[in-house]
Image: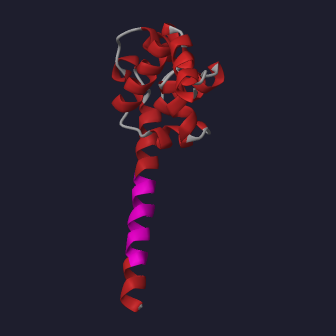
Amino acid sequence: MIKAERQKKVDAIEPAYVQLGERLRWLRHEARLSGKQLGERIGVHQPSVNSWERALGRVKVVDLVRIADAYGIEPAKFFTLLLSDLRIQDCGATEEVRAKRKAEYQKRAKRAAGAVRKKKRKKKGA
């Protein structure tokens, strides 16, 4: 019974949402982000990102704008990107955004390295 209900939901999904979800997933993979990382950047949980990509949830326009910001792309260009076969690099993320993203990644890497060193010191001391 539950399986039949689930199948009805899947059958009721509009092709446009499926196409949008596939495109969102493709762009996320192109940006080399996990669902969790994208969710953290836009302020939603990973299951929300997952449901959008599988067309089980409806993505809000405000979330699409946040995704565009996470990729460093103007929202108008991002919507064009969603509807075309262009790649993220073709939409010209600004140098300022790229530099900000790079600094953010370096900061995370330093924090992660510090946590690993701290953990090793604890093991030695124990």
Which residue is drawn at the image coordinates 34% and 19% (left, top)? 87
- Residue 60 versus residue 86 in the image, above or below: below
Quadrant position of residue 88: top left
Main secondary structure found in the magenta portion = helix
Image x and y of residue 83, in percent:
45, 9
Which residue is drawn at the image coordinates 65% and 23% (left, top)? 62
Image x and y of residue 76, in percent:
54, 13
Quadrant position of residue 26: top left
Is residue 98 left or right of 58 when viewed as pictured? left
Image x and y of residue 21, in percent:
47, 20
The residue segment tinted magenta is 106-119
Q: Nearer the viewer, residue 14 or 71?
A: 14
Q: Nearer the viewer, residue 3 or 69?
A: 3
Q: Disc count in the image?
A: 0
Image x and y of residue 72, in percent:
48, 29
Which residue is drawn at the image coordinates 45% and 62% (left, top)? 111
Q: How is the image coloured?
A: secondary structure
- Residue 39 versus residue 10 in the image, above or below: below
Name the residue furthest front: 1
The quarter of the image holding the N terminus is top right
Quadrant position of residue 118: bottom left
Q: Nearer the viewer, residue 98 or 57?
A: 57
Name the residue furthest bottom: 125
- Residue 11 versus residue 62 in the image, above or below: above
The quarter of the image holding the C terminus is bottom left
Please check the rendered image and state whether residue 78 is part of the magenta-colored stretch, yes or no.
no
Please check the rendered image and state whether residue 107 is part of the magenta-colored stretch, yes or no.
yes
Is residue 75 left or right of 94 when viewed as pictured? right
- Residue 38 versus residue 65 in the image, above or below: below
